[in-house]
Image: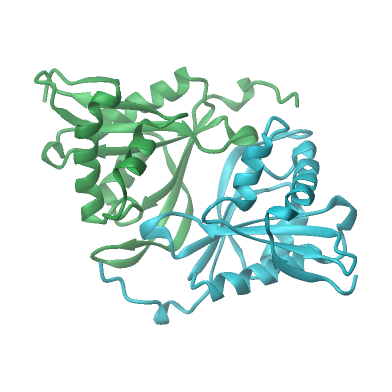
Chain colours: A cyan, B green
Amino acid sequence: MKDIQIRPAGDHDFEAIWSIFSAHVAAGETYPFTTATSREAGHAYWLGPDVASFIATSGSARVLGMYRLTRNQVGRGHHVANASYMVSPSAQGAGIGRMLGEHSLGEARRQGYLAMQFNYVVSTNTAAVRLWKKLGFSIVGTLPKAYRHKALGYVDAYVMYQLLQDPDHWPTVDS
Amino acid sequence: MKDIQIRPAGDHDFEAIWSIFSAHVAAGETYPFTTATSREAGHAYWLGPDVASFIATSGSARVLGMYRLTRNQVGRGHHVANASYMVSPSAQGAGIGRMLGEHSLGEARRQGYLAMQFNYVVSTNTAAVRLWKKLGFSIVGTLPKAYRHKALGYVDAYVMYQLLQDPDHWPTVDS
């Protein structure tokens, strides 16, 4: 695909976001949410305070996918970013996930984050695991049977992580 | 210490909870919160919806410590519990942490959780790591430099985990 742009998401994007989110949730293979998730909860997740979300659009303005970036912990952990990604089912296989991943790493660095952590990568989502490894993440933890996969039952989830800056140049901790 | 009881926490316990919480937060060695944490945020953390908190009290009704139990993820991860613990600085070394830990594992089983996960155990908090291992947890992940320790700078944090029920007897995933 060409003419793909990634830009900040706003409230006017919510219907498109909700549509992609709902498709992933219904599949029950990658994210913890179930189909019982309310629109309000979905809105808070993608467009709530302390969340920076971005969408990939094609020239025709169709939303192809999105990611959200936020801090993984408050306070003494707020130098570590967290991010989540979803690609429209009709746009999968076209490299949108990789574009979103690369954009999110740049955006996290731009926002001053020193590392990025994924808390809950479903182990059977091998395309995602492969992509995150290509983009510099390592599996730093395995959570036994932590994900209730709709088709496969209880499967492991991974914690993935990467430093975004050389620790020798991290700001000093002064309080 | 004797005559220690563990009971559900309520709003009337909040001043005692806040006092212990504030002491830990000021130390900056174990939890992500900073001293900028508002009372409202502290109240939501310990006594908010979807949180079950318990306190240990002595015969004199003094609060010696507390823990909070909640689900670690929504939906497809809601079979895994999460818990956090704080012991009053003046009651440390008396086995309160162990009592709270054992109580929380029993309570988690009673509530039907199938596993328990700690997302963010500071690696330099060796007393806690030792205790959780004694109580059946394993380190399943290491998060490099994920905690900004007040005295020691950036230190690793651990993800710890244990199954609470034999997986052969876990309920079937049906949706």
Report whether B42 appears left or right of A17.
Answer: left
Q: Is residue A130 above or below residue B125?
A: below
Q: Is residue A78 above or below residue A157?
A: below
> What is the residue that sits farthest to the front in this orientation?
A12
Residue drawn where x is 82% and y is 59% of the image: A64
Task: Give percent across and percent down for residue B51.
Answer: 42, 30
Residue drawn where x is 73% and y is 57% of the image: A128
Quarter the C terminus of chain A occupies: bottom left
Report whether B89 appears left or right of B165.
Answer: left
> What is the residue that sits farthest to the bottom in this orientation?
A169
Quarter the N terminus of chain A occupies: bottom right
Rendering quarter of residue A54: bottom right
Residue drawn where x is 29% and y is 26% of the image: B11
Closest to the observer: B6 or A155? B6
Rendering quarter of residue B59: top left
Task: Give percent across and percent down for residue A141.
Answer: 54, 52
Rendering quarter of residue A149: top right
